[in-house]
Image (spheres, rainbow, N blue to C red):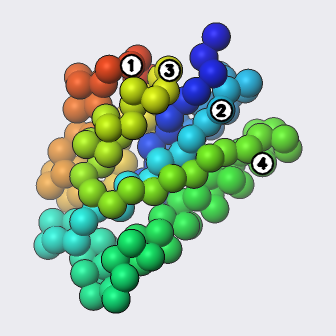
């Protein structure tokens, strides 16, 4: 029986499907939603605005809050008693997911996320997580 599940979310529809799957497939598990906010650079789209923030960590947490709010809505729709742990991290998504994966029994990830240009620059996060994860990974379309 799976008791701890990590679900990385980036605000995309595919990451929402991943959370919905995890809530349905593992109804008794402790589910953690991880939102990784990319460090500011010209390649990270909306995260470039974080470079202007006085406190980068506070700005990143605020950036992740809409993803967490949506995750809580999905959990409430799935089960009124569902609770989620939410954590955010500043950095590279693949590294952040893999750094936390050992603390879970499985990772449930959307098959892709973000815009086409984000995928071209960032690469396929799901593929890299599948290849490198120390725990089983479920990829949801």
Q: Residues within 10 Å of mark 4 (few under 14, many from 20)?
A: some
Residue 105 numbered mark, or none: 3
Q: Position of residue 121 (x, y in %)?
A: 14, 55
**Mark 2, residue position:** 30
Residue 74 falls left or right of residue 116:
right
Q: Is residue 123 above or below residue 128?
A: below
Between marks 4 and 2, how big is the CA–CA gap?
Answer: 15 Å
**Mark 1, residue position:** 135
Task: Find numbered disc 2 in the image and state the secondary structure of the residue it sits on.
Answer: strand
Q: Is residue 63 visible?
A: no
Between marks 3 and 4, how big is the CA–CA gap?
Answer: 23 Å
Which mark is nearer the camera, 4 or 2? 2
At x 61%, y 36%, the residue is 31
Task: Find numbered disc 3 in the image and state the secondary structure of the residue it sits on.
Answer: loop
Q: Position of residue 130 (x, y in %)?
A: 29, 24
Q: Position of residue 115 (x, y in %)?
A: 31, 57
Foreground pick, 69 / 56: 56
Instruction: Say whether disc 3 or disc 4 marks the residue closer to the N-terminus.
Output: 4
Q: Are marks 3 and 1 in contact (CB under 8 Å)?
A: yes
């Amino acid at each position: 029986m799976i008791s701890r599940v990590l679900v990385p979310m980036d605000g995309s529809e595919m990451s929402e499907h991943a959370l919905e799957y995890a809530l349905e497939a593992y109804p008794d598990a402790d589910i953690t939603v991880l939102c990784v906010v990319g460090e500011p650079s010209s390649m990270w789209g909306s995260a470039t605005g974080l470079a202007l923030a006085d406190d980068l960590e506070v700005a990143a947490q605020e950036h992740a809050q809409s993803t967490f709010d949506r995750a809580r809505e999905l959990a409430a729709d799935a089960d009124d008693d569902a609770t989620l742990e939410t954590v955010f991290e500043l950095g590279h998504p693949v590294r952040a997911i893999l750094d936390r994966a050992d603390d879970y029994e499985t990772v449930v990830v959307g098959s892709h996320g973000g815009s086409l240009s984000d995928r071209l620059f960032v690469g396929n996060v799901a593929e890299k997580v599948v290849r490198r994860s120390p725990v089983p990974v479920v990829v949801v379309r």
